[in-house]
């Protein structure tokens, strides 16, 4: 089912004497989510991700704008009639019910024509339990399950009614690192198998990049960029997006464009054809550095960290905004760790320049 957001806006009124005024939690969000895709909604804490999900499932009413599921305008439809499955960070299972009873719960509350027989309900519960691989745990209670298993139960409960769309709000945040990896792959598999249009909220850029068909990057209620993960990574529209995606993070420098060349400090590092002379932010991905003793970009070498397949060359430069510059280089390159300086060539497609005022991308 495609989902259309049209100028979706949510303003929370400021309350109390200390209030800084109204909060624009979501601002003019317009997007057509293609049918059957997994969308990663990504941004720092407080940027409006949960509010967007709450608007979609009907827990909040928009201040302005509309929501369509397929051709249906659902903006004024009560939450229980929207056919949305919701999964939360804290699982929100009923502790006194077994796994089976938790999964059956949404079916038992169906009314009228939608009502199912006991056998039909059990068959459906069994089917989704199998899908999320908890069918052996049906008689246990939540307290007898690991975090990852509990989250699978929550996913099964969200799926059992065959929702039109599935919304997940930071579903992996309470899991330890290994389970997080495993569960995110499971979510991807389940989404592919069911083909349910899914919106997955996270503040973790790696998580969003790894499982999404499309990512939406938000900042302070405003959508910054929408695209395939690799496209957004390779072509960030502004400095915020460039900094938000990638580990280790992108390296940012004070620089300038002069006479069609890009400068960082005293170093003329690359061509910058067609860009008027101005001060800029220069941002270089860690994988954008190539060791070269005659390289144009000179830094002060701090240390070399071995990471197996790669090495991380840690250096400093007066023009750097970050405390240190991290460059990731294939391990077969040898670095003279005793040297005071290290010089690099830069890969042009890994270097961006941004306007100092608007922070929009120039190069
Ligand atoms: P995220 O999920 O990205 O962390 P939220 O959507 O929860 O962000 O919040 C977005 C902004 O809206 C924040 O500034 C938050 O404080 C504010 N906000 C969220 N819910 C409410 C509410 N019920 N009343 C007032 N302000 C709210
Ligand atoms: Mg949130």
Image (tube, rainbow, N blue to C red):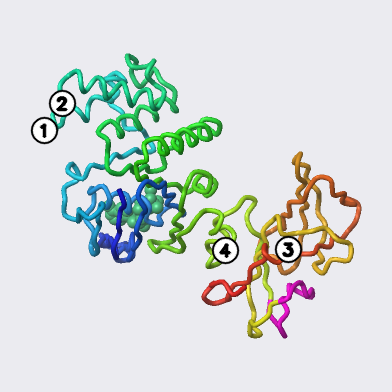
Q: Nearer the viewer, mark 2 or mark 1?
A: 2
Query: In the rendered image, which quarter is residue 163 located in?
Result: top left
What residue does disc 3 label? 347
Task: Classify mark 2 as within 8 Å of ligand 2 or not, answering yes or no.
Answer: no
Q: Secondary structure at mark 3?
A: loop
Location of mark 2 (residue): 116
Label 2 SS:
loop
Magenta residue span: 256-271
* Residue furthest left in the image: 112
Residue designated by label 1: 111
**In the image, residue 7 lies at what x, y percent?**
29, 65
Q: Residues within 10 Å of mark 3 (few under 14, many from 20)?
A: some
Look at the numbered disc 4 and give the secondary structure of its residue.
Answer: loop
Q: Earlier in the sequence, mark 3 or mark 2?
A: 2
Q: Is mark 4 within 8 Å of ligand 1?
A: no
Residue beneath label 4, please? 235
Marks 1 and 4, the one that precedes in the sequence: 1
Q: Decide whether residue 259 is among the magenta residues.
A: yes
- Front position among marks 4 and 2: 2
Q: Nearer the viewer, residue 255 or 232?
A: 232
Give the class, few, some or many, for how many residues have Cα within 10 Å of label 2's Cα (few <14, many ≥20): some
Residue 83 painted magenta: no
* Separation of residues labelled 4 and 2 (CA atoms): 50 Å
Badge 4 crowding class, 10 Å Cα cut-off, few under 14, some 14 to 19, many 20 or more, is some
Residue 222, position as x, y percentages in the image: 39, 64
Percent of width and height locating residue 63: 23, 62
């Amino acid at each position: 089912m495609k989902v259309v957001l049209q100028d979706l806006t949510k303003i929370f009124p400021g309350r109390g004497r200390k209030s800084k005024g109204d909060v624009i939690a979501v601002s003019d969000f317009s997007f057509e989510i293609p049918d059957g895709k997994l969308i990663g909604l990504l941004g720092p804490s407080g940027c409006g991700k949960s509010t967007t999900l709450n608007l979609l499932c009907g827990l909040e009413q928009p201040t302005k704008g509309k929501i369509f599921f397929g051709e249906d305008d659902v903006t004024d439809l009560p939450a229980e009639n929207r056919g949305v499955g919701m999964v939360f960070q804290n699982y929100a299972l009923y502790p006194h019910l077994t796994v089976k009873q938790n999964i059956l719960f949404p079916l038992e509350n169906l009314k009228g024509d939608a009502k199912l027989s006991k056998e039909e309900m059990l068959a459906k519960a069994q089917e989704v339990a199998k899908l999320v691989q908890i069918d052996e745990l049906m008689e246990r209670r939540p307290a007898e399950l690991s975090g990852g298993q509990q989250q699978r139960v929550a996913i099964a409960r969200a799926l059992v009614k065959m929702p039109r769309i599935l919304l997940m709000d930071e579903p992996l945040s309470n899991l330890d690192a290994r389970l997080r990896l495993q569960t995110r792959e499971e979510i991807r598999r389940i989404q592919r198998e069911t083909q349910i249009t899914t919106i997955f909220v996270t503040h973790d850029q790696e998580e969003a990049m790894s499982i999404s068909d499309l990512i939406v990057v938000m900042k302070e209620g405003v959508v910054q960029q929408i695209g395939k993960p690799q496209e957004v990574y390779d072509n960030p529209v502004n400095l915020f997006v460039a900094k938000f995606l990638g580990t280790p993070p992108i390296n940012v420098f004070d620089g300038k464009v002069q006479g069609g060349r890009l400068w960082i400090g005293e170093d003329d590092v690359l061509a910058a054809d067609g860009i008027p002379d101005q001060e800029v932010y220069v941002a270089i991905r860690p994988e954008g550095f190539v060791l070269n003793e005659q390289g144009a970009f000179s830094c002060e070498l701090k240390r070399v960290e071995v990471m197996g397949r790669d090495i991380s060359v840690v250096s400093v430069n007066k023009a750097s905004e970050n405390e240190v510059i991290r460059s990731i280089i294939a391990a077969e390159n040898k670095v003279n760790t005793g040297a005071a300086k290290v010089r690099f060539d830069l890969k042009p497609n890994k270097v961006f320049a941004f306007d100092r005022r608007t922070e929009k991308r120039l190069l």
